[in-house]
Image (spheres, helix red, strand yellow):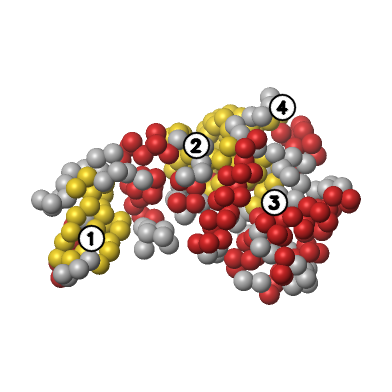
Amino acid sequence: MELTIINLCKRFKDKTAVADVSLNLTPGVWGLLGANGAGKTTLMRMIADILNPTGGKILYDGKDIHTMKAAYRNLFGFLPQDFGFFQDFTVWDYLEYVAALKDVPVRETRKKIDSLLDTLTLADVRNKKIIKLSGGMKRRVGIAQAMLNDPGILIMDEPTAGLDPGERVRFRNFISEFSHDRIVLISTHIVSDIEYIATKNAIMKNGKILNVGTTDELVKQVAGKVWTCLVPADKMPLYEMQLRIINQRNECNNKVSIRYLADEAKTRDSIMAPPRLEDLYLWLFPQEGLNEEGK
């Protein structure tokens, strides 16, 4: 199973959202990392065949997805950033409706929905209207609808937005197991959600793919640029102006432990730290600041 993206482009009037992107996606979890406006959502919508490219093509096992039509849709699952639903739908009614749209056999629908509700801890709200659910629960309903047809290709745009830490752990474990013989592409700002489960990551900036590789391969770009040290608490305002601090933690004796990015050590007692994927993300996209786990 391969999804091959060849010289894909998308232009909107005078703006190029995706510029000559080529990727070869194979089974496993793929992380798609990039700042807001990088072109990730546009790329995903073209892969989902709901947005026509300006140029280039997408092949599934050598066949152009535009010519496959229903055959492609039947093996595809998609979770957009904002998925729509009628306000009067209950969780069960909505999933039953989506299952019908995806041509899931009626005899399999109830069993499939029950399984997903249990897996995503939604069984207790199956008869509750979606409009009354919390943000995290709505997101889990969105994940469920994307997986109703047991897709061979699963594309998810910010799937963990609104999920609490425990829900994110369960999601990671679920997706890791699910992806064994499927292609899963996940775009997220919460880098830790894909750092340890991604087979490979693609880094996107200004509509282009900068790098593709495993987490270990990619973080080598910031090897020797991540530092830790202890600083006096009363000096923190000065250090915050002078350093790109990505983490800080209060310690004993009015000291603060900081983790910062720099080409070389900026204090005498700085110690080089092993780089993480979040470090690379913040090195490449400093304007993004810290995600919710880094605050």
Q: Is residue 144 visible?
A: yes
Outermost residue toward the top in this view: 62
| Disc ID at residue 63 | 4
Looking at the image, tell me whether mark 3 or mark 2 is earlier in sequence order. 3
Q: Secondary structure at mark 1?
A: strand
Q: Which residue is depicted at the point 62% across and 37% down? A: 180
Choose mark 2 or mark 4, whichever is in front: 2
Residue located beneath label 3 in the image: 146
Label 2 vs label 4: CA separation?
Answer: 23 Å
Looking at the image, tell me whether mark 3 or mark 4 is earlier in sequence order. 4
Residue located beneath label 1 in the image: 257
Residue located beneath label 2 in the image: 200
Q: Secondary structure at mark 2?
A: strand
Looking at the image, tell me whether mark 1 or mark 4 is earlier in sequence order. 4
- Callouts 3 and 4 close, C-beta under 8 Å: no
Q: Secondary structure at mark 3?
A: helix
Q: Secondary structure at mark 4?
A: strand
Q: Which residue is depicted at the point 36% across and 39% down? A: 219
Label 1 vs label 3: CA separation?
Answer: 42 Å
Percent coordinates x, y for residue 158 in the rendering: 55, 54
Task: Looking at the picture, tell me which residue is in the foreground, 208 or 79.
Answer: 79
| Left or right for 249, reference 93 | left
The type of residue carrying mark 4 is Lys
Label 1 vs label 4: CA separation?
Answer: 54 Å
The type of residue carrying mark 2 is Lys
Looking at the image, tell me whether mark 2 or mark 1 is earlier in sequence order. 2
- Mark 3 surroundings: few (<14), some (14-19) or many (≥20) residues within 10 A: many
The type of residue carrying mark 1 is Ser
Choose mark 3 or mark 4, whichever is in front: 3
The type of residue carrying mark 3 is Ala
